[in-house]
Amino acid sequence: MTELSGWEHFYSVVGSSAGALIGLQFVVLTLIAHLPAGDVDGQTGNAFTTPTMVHFGVVLLLSAVASAPWHAISPFADVCGVTGFLGVGYTIVTARRLGSQTAYHPVFEDRLFHIVLPLAAYGVLLGSAFAADPYPRPALFAVGGAALLLLFIGIHNAWDTVTFHVFVKRQNEKNSGDRPAQDRPE
């Protein structure tokens, strides 16, 4: 397919980065698993960590699908459209999870990187599916931009999660006199 030719290196770099970051996220989560959890539960993981993995996974998926030997742009556009639609739905679920978890009060930056920017990226993917047939070149740039945005969102969110657990949670443990969580006054 001529429309996707020339994108091989872009998706090779972006997809490899997403795959490596997925693996790195598993390593980091394993390393910080020994830190005391305090009042963190599965709700916060579903609200903060899982979406990061989903964004990395979507970038990896887009990279793999873009690298397939398509003979037309429409199958790739269809995958982008379905992914964008599902991504918008998933971001709405994430927004509900963000608001319903009680272990951490989200600030503007959390809403920006967990709701607003992912909605924009998935919306662009959805829109690119409709634009791909009449305007393939701009649509492919839109998909590439959405993939990069999701990659950078994932990097930000992964860093934010790790720094929260390592610095904030660890500092809270030190300030509480290194007592186990169940012994601390509420």
Image: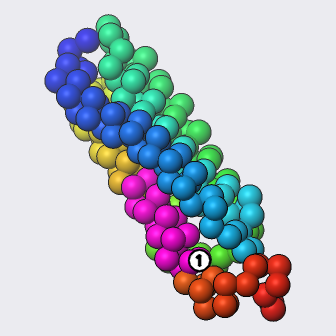
The N terminus sits in image quarter: top left
> From this viewpoint, is residue 36 visible?
yes
**Front in this rendered view, residue 69 or 27:** 27
Residue 169 lies within the magenta run: yes
**Front in this rendered view, residue 139 or 33:** 33
On screen, residue 77 above or below 126: above
On screen, residue 44 above or below 61: below
Residue 70 falls left or right of residue 79: left
**Front in this rendered view, residue 117 or 77:** 117
On screen, residue 44 above or below 120: below
Q: Main secondary structure of the magenta part?
A: helix
What number of labels is visible?
1
The C terminus sits in image quarter: bottom right
Q: How is the image coloured?
A: rainbow
Residue 141 falls left or right of residue 42: left
Q: Residue at x 63, y 82 (%)?
A: 173
- Please, what is the three-letter code of the amino acid marked with disc 1? Lys
In the image, which residues are magenta?
154-170
Which residue is tagged 1?
169
**Front in this rendered view, residue 38 or 132:** 38
| SS at mark 1 in the image | helix
Q: Residue at x 59, y 39 (%)?
A: 86
- The residue at the far front in this view is 178
Q: Residue at x 46, y 40 (%)?
A: 23
Q: Residue at x 76, y 79 (%)?
A: 181
Residue 19 falls left or right of residue 172: left
Q: Residues within 10 Å of mark 1 (few under 14, many from 20)?
A: some
